[in-house]
Amino acid sequence: MGRLVMKFGGTSVANIDRIRNVARHVKREVDAGHDVAVVVSAMSGKTNELVEWCGDASPLHDAREYDAVVASGEQVTSGLLAIVLQGMGIQARSWQGWQIPIKTSDAHASARILEIDGSEISARFKDRQEVAVIAGFQGINPQTNRITTLGRGGSDTSAVAIAAAIRADRCDIYTDVDGVYTTDPRVVPKARRLDKIAFEDMLELASLGAKVLQVRSVELGMVHNIPVFVRSSFDKPEDIDPHGTPPGTLICSEEEIMESHVVTGIAFSKDEAQISLRQIEDKPGVAAAIFGPLADANINVDMIVQNVSEDGKTTDLTFTVPASDYNRARDTITSSKGKIGYARLDSATDVSKVSVIGSGMRSHAGVAAKAFKALSERNINIRAITTSEIKFSVLIDAAYTELAVRTLHTLYGLDQT
Amino acid sequence: MGRLVMKFGGTSVANIDRIRNVARHVKREVDAGHDVAVVVSAMSGKTNELVEWCGDASPLHDAREYDAVVASGEQVTSGLLAIVLQGMGIQARSWQGWQIPIKTSDAHASARILEIDGSEISARFKDRQEVAVIAGFQGINPQTNRITTLGRGGSDTSAVAIAAAIRADRCDIYTDVDGVYTTDPRVVPKARRLDKIAFEDMLELASLGAKVLQVRSVELGMVHNIPVFVRSSFDKPEDIDPHGTPPGTLICSEEEIMESHVVTGIAFSKDEAQISLRQIEDKPGVAAAIFGPLADANINVDMIVQNVSEDGKTTDLTFTVPASDYNRARDTITSSKGKIGYARLDSATDVSKVSVIGSGMRSHAGVAAKAFKALSERNINIRAITTSEIKFSVLIDAAYTELAVRTLHTLYGLDQT
């Protein structure tokens, strides 16, 4: 007997039949004797529709009103799932963010969860074995009493935060893939599903382009040490043994992973653009002159690499931005040219970033060097490199992305056997 | 300068274009210097869709979950209207029932409003000329902190209750007809729109089949003496002079109506069924034996007429029920036959009720007698009669409904000239 949070996304609750399927998953866990809180998204397509209406109402809309409108989608599915569960003879009630309450920051449309009071939900587990069906993606600004939302994909974060608040033993994320893979199986057919992955590695994977989970939800799992289990929502509820080990990937602390590989996975992102400034005068304040205006324009700068030029007096600086921000970034830099002082701006939009992740790197030297050699043997030119304790990334021509990912996947022994 | 509540129904907010039209109506009143609270329904069709989903989820669903699901419709329109108003440069914010709060009884799905705190809305009128955009049809159960709804058509009631809470000078109900008519214009082309009607008369009209307003909203208007103005939502906002007298019907206290007619209007309802019990033994407790089981079965009994039989020892009793409840009512009575003790049950389902309403009847004798004579001259057989201080109703064969309504409309001088 334990305590469980189960999270279902939009495709899993797209209509009443699918909601009924979700309810059977819940029933299985209840029948196994677990206390269960379920977190649901809006029916698939519903949030997009509501977002569109807000845009039609006014292109520059008040984020507080946007939140009030958009949060209604999860309200509907939580109520419907509670009704279906009750119809199956299971005690259940729906909870909206403001009812629990899930207190958040005042950053409407991208609020951060600050505090969740899990006492009432826990009390109801004890008193009446009642399943809590919680509207994901939303909370309340306690100062103004207005609804907030957490930004797209926020229901993952809701689920892990609630798991922490009610001290759950595990948070199960039901999704349209059956776990976390060593890399995207569409690119590398030999990609392997990981049975376990450390929080740190998952954080890098999610940040670097794997879209299984929202990054913030992994952070919360790590901070509160809540094991997060990524599993398929397509499995038939009846076929699953609640006491067995279903297919999926457990994201947990490093200590719980016995047999660890040096490299856990390969992530990649094609939506990158590179900007290089040549022969910048090497003086204090030049970085601020470049990145200050970009930050003001709300452009997310990713890789930053600075080299000393051949002349030894000036420096070259390369950075990447999301491809969608490329034009704005370029305009921002060129309009500050006088202040920065550089000779030439080179850029490329057909580049991609390939990252190798593994907390095992901490104790293994030469992991990256192997990669550089393998890529050069394939004639793949590396435009820039960044490294951290548990990952390194290379920027390459986009055309070589798949070749590079497959090469590294084999190199680090990740291929299925 | 005054304080105004404006209420718009589902067809008026069916899409963003129509919401924009509503916003122009609001802007007109704001520009005229009024404090404005707007009450909106869900987009037309939306509530039906949500109700249907609840039914699909489980035929016997928890009314608390039903309310959580169904109240989302008004939440969406209130947010969207606030966005559109802001886009026009008008200060506005949306309010959900629980935010104000609108405290109601715990009768989920058909809750009654108990108390509304209008202080924050009033303060914001004063401090920042902010329009309050309020989700109609909903409130909160203060004991459980859960959303309640007021039953279908409840947004009219929300509007008048809010008008009372903020001490508005008037509550404007924008609807798809341009006012209250002496009778249904589809039946009597000569029906006249009333400029004014007393609360009491409107209450009878609404109760007896005129579907312009929810009965409860008229009651609230009467109790709190809030003039309610029924007007068309199809008028172009630009064509209306905010200082003039637009077409519509003002529902107000009797004293404000200078020129009053004895009869105000004719209502009718075709969804009636008649049940007559013959030769009931005339003993104490027999009425309870009949109507007790009907009440337990939640069947609404309307007209009740009791006559002494020809033999002077037994009595005949006739009553009406909604046609949709006829079968259940008949079964309920026949299964209690032994307890009641009657000789024969006669019934008719093709009957209709025609009612003549007018608070002027109080001071005029013989109003009903004129009607009985006129109907008999047309060979219309009266099956039963009930009277009250300000109205009387006759039960007749449904086939004669239109003829009877037209005859009475002319008889009491209600035809257009």
Image (cartoon, coloured by chain):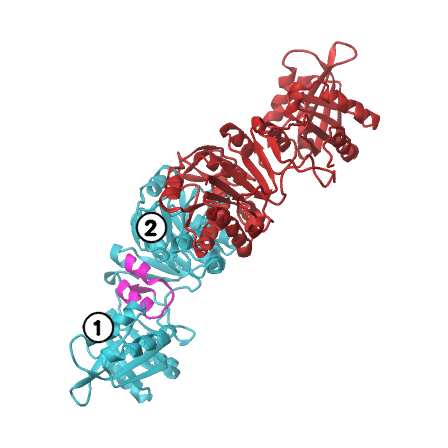
Chain colours: A cyan, B red
| Quadrant where the C terminus of chain B is found in the figure | top right
Measure how far apart labels 2 and 1 are at the Cα level.
40 Å
Q: Position of residue A326 (x, y in %)?
A: 36, 76
Name the amino acid type tagged 2. Answer: Ile
- Secondary structure beneath label 1: helix
Disc 2 crowd rating (10 Å Cα; few below 14, some 14-19, many 20+) is: many
**Tag shown at residue A288:** 1
Residue located beneath label 2 in the image: A162
| Residue A202 inside the magenta-drawn segment | yes
Q: Which residues are magenta?
A: A195-220
Disc with the residue nearer the chain's start (2 vs 1): 2
Which label number is shown at residue A184? none
Is B338 situated above or below A223? above
Residue B186 position, x and y percent, is: 72, 41
Residue in the picture at 51% in, 43% down: B6
Q: Identify the secondary structure beneath mark 2.
A: helix
* A271 or B153, nearer to the observer: B153
How many numbered discs sit on the rendered protein? Answer: 2
Judge left or right: residue B103 versus residue B346: left
